[in-house]
């Protein structure tokens, strides 16, 4: 299969065929086609409800990513005493010093390892119910390189609980033939009155340099795809900007090199997703609005907010809730845009969520009649976390708001799923009884930060390992039951918990 794909790409470069990424097959288009634009980063399907979905597209100059053996930039930092630029000192993590980006001779941001440079052109999306005879088509839309050649399409008027086929097509201009096609599929949420079994998967902390499947990307994506989830949630730290993103172009490169891996392309064209952001994919470690540092160079916090919205299918409001049938409703919250400085004295005015989001959350939860209510948070609410951390509701520095939220969430009979931590755990708050499930990082190579022998009284399970959280909402004699399963990167079961009552 791989040799066939290499031959296909070789033929493509000779101008004899168009690129098609299909579901288990390749379609042949007329032999005379333009050389691009391509879609090396595939599509993403997001914000799926019972009636709508967003399809994310991006046009690329090349059909595949620049190989990993291509040059990469070198980052130096200015010595404030000598004025000279040099590598970081040993033990320096994020120095407050001016950076300089050096590209190898002849290289630039479009030719470095993993790059999939953007290109202007046109794109459209077509969709139909699975097995349908005719396609609905959105109009062709112009794409420019100003936003990394991305374009999002909102599909409306979809039928609940229905699998849809979708395809994105690209061309340079209206007179040109279709140059590339990416095919995919997704399932809409069941109607709120329908008691239907639901399965979804959750991940966090996806460090490029800690991938475990070479040129394919991460093993976890193939494992999750085999389990056939109804939807997927990425709780944040999708990319890690800190060390290499010193301007907006390098920030976009971080997304290009990750989402051009075959495993990620294959997954995201077949599973609807909800994306959330945390610190590393907003700007840098433990960041907040107004934070000052020279470490990130010309790349700003505001640009980080912009790039995230550009790179994922996402609703205009960063906090949102989705109903999946009669029994399940999820809440996705935003933890970077509205927060107070981490070192601000704790008290009623210190916040991570912000007053408007908290008010929305309380009102929407109290209005819900879903038997299974789950908060999905980029950061911990219960923990336990390491005592030196100052960034989330499980830390003492946000104790006031944390205690308020834990009480409210527990009173509503909800569960919490969180990302951010580089280990898996399940815990039960000793004051409120609130249950929290930390999904763990995308690869075991990225696991760490907790001593696995340090099992606290709150822990039901703790494991320093990569993997994902699978959640099943099932019906037994018409009554909903939720089951939380921690899995390894290959899909093996590590821990399973079914709450009682």
Image (cartoon, grey):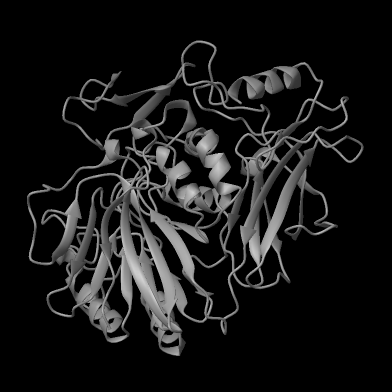
Looking at the image, residue 61 lies above or below residue 413: above
Q: Quadrant of the N terminus?
A: top right
Can residue 353 be seen here? no
**Residue 22 at x, y = what percent?**
69, 40
Residue at (88, 34) in percent of width and height: 176
Residue 335 locus on image (x, y percent) = 36, 63
Q: Is residue 120 above or below residue 111?
A: below
The residue closer to the viewer here, 97 or 467, is 467
Q: Quadrant of the C terminus?
A: bottom left
Pick whichever, 305 or 193, lies toward us: 193
Looking at the image, residue 437 sits to the left or right of residue 39; the answer is left
> Which residue is found at the position 19% from the left and 32% from the top?
92
Q: Position of residue 498 (x, y in %)?
A: 29, 71
* Residue that appears at 66% across and 72% down: 51
Number of marks present in the image shown: 0
Left of 383 or right of it: where is 177?
right
Q: Nearer the viewer, residue 132 or 343?
A: 132
Name above or below for residue 324 compared with residue 34: below
Residue 118, quarter of the rendered image: top right
């Amino acid at each position: 299969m791989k040799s066939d794909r290499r031959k296909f790409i070789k033929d493509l470069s000779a101008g004899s065929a168009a690129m098609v990424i299909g579901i288990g097959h390749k379609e042949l288009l007329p032999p005379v086609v333009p050389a691009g634009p391509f879609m090396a980063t595939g599509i993403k399907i997001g914000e799926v409800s019972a009636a709508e979905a967003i399809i994310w597209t991006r046009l690329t100059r090349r059909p595949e990513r620049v190989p990993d053996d291509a040059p990469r930039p070198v980052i130096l930092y200015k010595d404030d005493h000598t004025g000279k630029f040099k590598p970081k000192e040993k033990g320096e993590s994020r120095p407050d010093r001016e950076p300089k980006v050096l590209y190898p001779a002849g290289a630039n941001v479009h030719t470095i390892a993993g790059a999939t440079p953007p290109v202007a052109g046109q794109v459209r999306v077509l969709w139909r119910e699975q097995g349908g005879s005719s396609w609905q088509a959105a109009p062709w839309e112009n794409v420019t390189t100003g936003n990394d050649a991305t374009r999002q399409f909102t599909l409306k008027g979809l039928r609940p609980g229905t699998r849809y086929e979708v395809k994105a097509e690209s061309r340079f201009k209206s007179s040109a033939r279709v140059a590339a096609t990416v095919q995919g599929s997704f399932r809409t949420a069941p109607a709120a009155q329908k008691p239907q079994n639901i399965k979804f998967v959750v991940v966090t902390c996806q460090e490029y340099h800690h991938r475990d499947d070479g040129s394919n990307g991460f093993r976890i994506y193939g494992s999750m795809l085999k389990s056939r989830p109804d939807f997927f949630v990425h709780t944040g730290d999708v990319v890690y900007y800190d060390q290499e993103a010193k301007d907006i172009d390098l920030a976009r490169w971080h997304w290009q090199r990750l989402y051009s891996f075959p495993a990620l392309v294959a997954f995201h064209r077949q599973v609807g997703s909800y994306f959330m952001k945390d610190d590393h994919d907003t700007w840098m470690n433990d960041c907040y609005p107004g934070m000052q540092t020279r470490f990130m160079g010309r790349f700003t916090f505001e640009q980080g907010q912009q790039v995230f919205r550009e790179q994922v299918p996402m609703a205009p409001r960063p906090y949102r809730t989705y109903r999946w049938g009669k029994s399940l409703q999820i809440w996705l919250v935003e933890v970077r845009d509205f927060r107070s400085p981490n070192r601000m004295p704790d008290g009623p005015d210190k916040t991570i969520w912000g007053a408007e989001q908290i008010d929305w959350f309380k009102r929407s939860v109290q209005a819900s009649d879903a038997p299974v209510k789950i908060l999905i948070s980029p950061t911990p609410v219960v923990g336990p976390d390491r005592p030196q951390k100052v960034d989330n509701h499980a830390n003492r520095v946000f104790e006031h708001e944390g205690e308020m939220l834990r009480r409210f969430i527990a009173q509503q009979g909800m569960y919490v799923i969180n990302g951010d931590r580089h280990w898996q755990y399940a815990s039960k708050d000793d004051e409120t009884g609130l249950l929290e499930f930390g999904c763990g990082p995308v690869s075991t190579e990225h696991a760490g930060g907790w001593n696995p022998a340090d099992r606290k009284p709150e822990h039901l399970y703790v494991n320093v390992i990569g993997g994902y959280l699978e959640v099943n909402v099932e019906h037994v004699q018409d009554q909903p039951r939720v089951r939380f399963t921690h899995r390894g990167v290959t899909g093996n079961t590590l821990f399973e918990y079914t709450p009682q009552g």
